[in-house]
Image: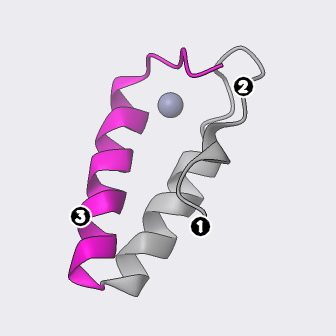
Amino acid sequence: MGSVNCAKCAKLRAELAEAEEAGNKTKVIDCRVLLRRHPQHDEVPVESKGEK
Ligand SMILES: [Zn+2]
């Protein structure tokens, strides 16, 4: 696990972290949805991070 090399997901994760810091809930949700729509990384669930 953790071997997801997807530039788009990496970017989305960065944006997600930024949005969380900025308290931008709309964008947080947006990024999470987009990350979930990227399921094609060797059966590894993409959404594993970001939940506390
Ligand atoms: Zn991806």
- Classified by dominant secondary structure, the portion drawn in magenta counts as helix
Q: Is residue 19 on the magenta stretch?
A: yes
Reply yes or no: does residue 3 show up in magenta: yes
Question: What span is colored magenta in the figure?
Answer: 1-23
Height in image: 29 above or below 50? Answer: below
The answer for how far apart the CA atoms under marks 2 and 1 are is 19 Å
Pointer 1 residue? 52
Mark 2 neighbour class, 10 Å CA radius: few under 14, some 14 to 19, many 20 or more = some
Residue 16 showing in the rendered view: yes
For the residue marked with disc 2, what is the amino acid? Val
Q: Position of residue 19 (x, y in %)?
A: 28, 71
- Badge 1, how many Cα within 10 Å: few under 14, some, many 20+? few
Which quadrant of the view contains residue 11? top left
Residue under the image location 50 percent in, 73 percent down = 29
Residue placed under numbered mark 3 in the picture: 18
Say left or right for 51 vs 31. Answer: right
Q: How is the image coloured?
A: one colour
Q: Is mark 3 within 8 Å of ligand 1?
A: no
Secondary structure at badge 2 equals loop
Tell me which numbered mark, 2 or 3, is placed earlier along the sequence.
3
Q: Secondary structure at mark 1?
A: loop
Question: Residue tagged by mark 2?
Answer: 44
Q: Position of residue 6 (x, y in %)?
A: 43, 22
Q: Nearer the viewer, residue 30 or 2?
A: 2
Q: Residue at x 21, y 80 (%)?
A: 22
Cα–Cα gap, marks 2 and 3: 23 Å
Q: Which one is in front, 45 or 39?
A: 45
